[in-house]
Image (spheres, rainbow, N blue to C red):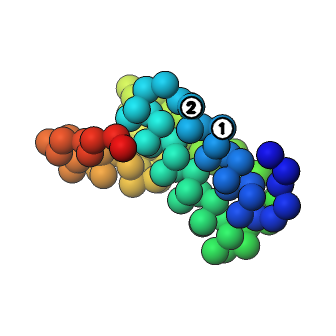
Amino acid sequence: MIIEDEASVTDAVLQAFATTPEPRTRQILLALVRHLHAFAREVRLTEPEFQEATRIIAALGQIRRDDPSPAPRSMSGTPRRKASMRTRTPPRPR
């Protein structure tokens, strides 16, 4: 695929993930790509900002569950969001 503009980048990434074998994983990855690319366009994310964001996300991924400090884990708000979703049934993959 030839990437000619911003929309082409998103399409190329979506195409790459479209063959993900597990339907739920594919659904999550495709939604994540669409949302992240839309966010980057909306805020006109620069390369240095992108690098800093990936550093922060990688650091969040390194936090241990048994770490007594709640601050790093709660930075993203994800633990609370996940807790509120535990009883929900995930949507069926398309």
Which residue is pictured at 21% across the width and 50% down the height?
Answer: 84
Q: Identify the image quadrant of residue 49.
A: bottom right
Whether residue 45 can be seen here: yes
Residue 62 spot, x, y in % from top left: 56, 31
Residue 8 spot, x, y in % from top left: 74, 58
Which residue is pictured at 60% across the width and 66% down the height?
Answer: 39
Secondary structure state at the residue bearing disc 1: helix
Depth check, front residue: 92 or 65 = 92
Disc 2 crowd rating (10 Å Cα; few below 14, some 14-19, many 20+) is few
Which numbered tag is attached to residue 56?
Answer: none
Disc 1 crowd rating (10 Å Cα; few below 14, some 14-19, many 20+) is few
Depth check, front residue: 68 or 26 = 26
Residue wearing tag 1: 16
Task: Report the quarter where the C terminus lies.
Answer: top left
Residue 41 spot, x, y in % from top left: 68, 70
Taking the image as shown, residue 53 lies to the left or right of residue 23, namely right
Q: Identify the image quadrant of residue 19.
A: top right
Secondary structure state at the residue bearing disc 2: loop
Depth check, front residue: 50 or 68 = 50
Taking the image as shown, residue 54 lies to the left or right of residue 71, namely right
